[in-house]
Image: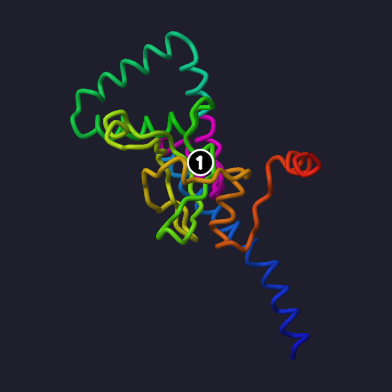
Amino acid sequence: MAALKKYFITGLLIWIPLVITVWVLKAIIGIMDQSLQLLPEAIHPQNLLGFHLPGAGTVLTLLVILVTGLVTANIVGQKLVRFWEGVLARIPVVKSIYYSVKQVSDTLFSGSGEAFRKVLLVRYPHPQAWSVAFQTGAPAQQIGEMLPDEHVSVFIPTAPSPVNGFFFFVKKSETIELDISVDDALKYIVSMGVVPPQRRHPNLVGRAQNE
C-alpha cells in the first residue's frame, strides 16, 4: 500500500501542474478569442474553414496590440491618442475609470517606474509577524507631510491569490529589502511558502562572506 500511495502522489505531482497550466491557458485563450466578435460574421474563421479554430482570436488580439503600438509610435498616432483621450475626458464616469487604470498600467509597465520593483519584508498583521510585500512607491505629498518619518507605500498580497491584498504606508526604517525578484516572490506567495525564492545576486553574498 505504501508503494501504491507513493506512485499515486508522484502521478499527482506530474498531472496537477500540467492540468492547471492547460486550464489557465484555455481560459486566457477563450477570453482573447472574444475579439473575433469584432470581425464581420462572414469572415469568421469558423465560417471560412468550416470548423472552430481555437486561438484564432488570440492571434488577432496580439496583432491588434502590435499594430496599435506601431501606429501610436509616430506623431500622427500620438495625435490620435490625444484626441481619443480628450473625448474620454469629457465623459465624467469614464474619465475617472480610464485615467485611474491608465496611471496604474503606465506605472507597472514603464521601465523607469519604481512600482513593484522591490520585494520587502514588513511587520504585518502584528509587530511579531512578517509578511512579504511589494513597494509601490512613496506616499503622496499631502500624506507624506503628515507622517513624522520617511514612509513607503506597500502592497501586501494574500495567499494563494496575490491579486487581492492590502495597501499600507509603513516606515521605511522598519522594512527589510529582499534580494529576490518579483516573479519569485509571487511564486513564493502562491505556493504559500512551498516554492522557495532564489537570490538575484548570489555572488554578492559569497563575496561579502569572504570579506
Q: Nearer the viewer, residue 156 or 65?
A: 156
Q: Is residue 104 magenta?
A: no
User: In the drawing, does residue 150 fall left or right of residue 1?
Assistant: left
User: In the drawing, does residue 208 fall left or right of residue 89?
Assistant: right
Amino acid type, callout 1: Gly
Q: Position of residue 113 (x, y in %)?
A: 49, 28
Q: Nearer the viewer, residue 13 or 132?
A: 132
Residue range highlighted in magenta:
38-64
Q: Is residue 44 magenta?
A: yes
Q: Position of residue 211 (x, y in %)?
A: 79, 39
Residue occupying the point 48% across, 48% down: 133
Q: Position of residue 77 (x, y in %)?
A: 43, 14
Q: Residues within 10 Å of mark 1 (few under 14, many from 20)?
A: many
Q: Nearer the viewer, residue 105 or 14?
A: 105
Whether 97 is drawn above or below 12: the answer is above
Residue that label 1 marks: 57
Q: Residue furthest top?
A: 75
Element marked by disc 1: helix
Q: Main secondary structure of the magenta part?
A: helix
Whether 83 is drawn above or below 4: the answer is above
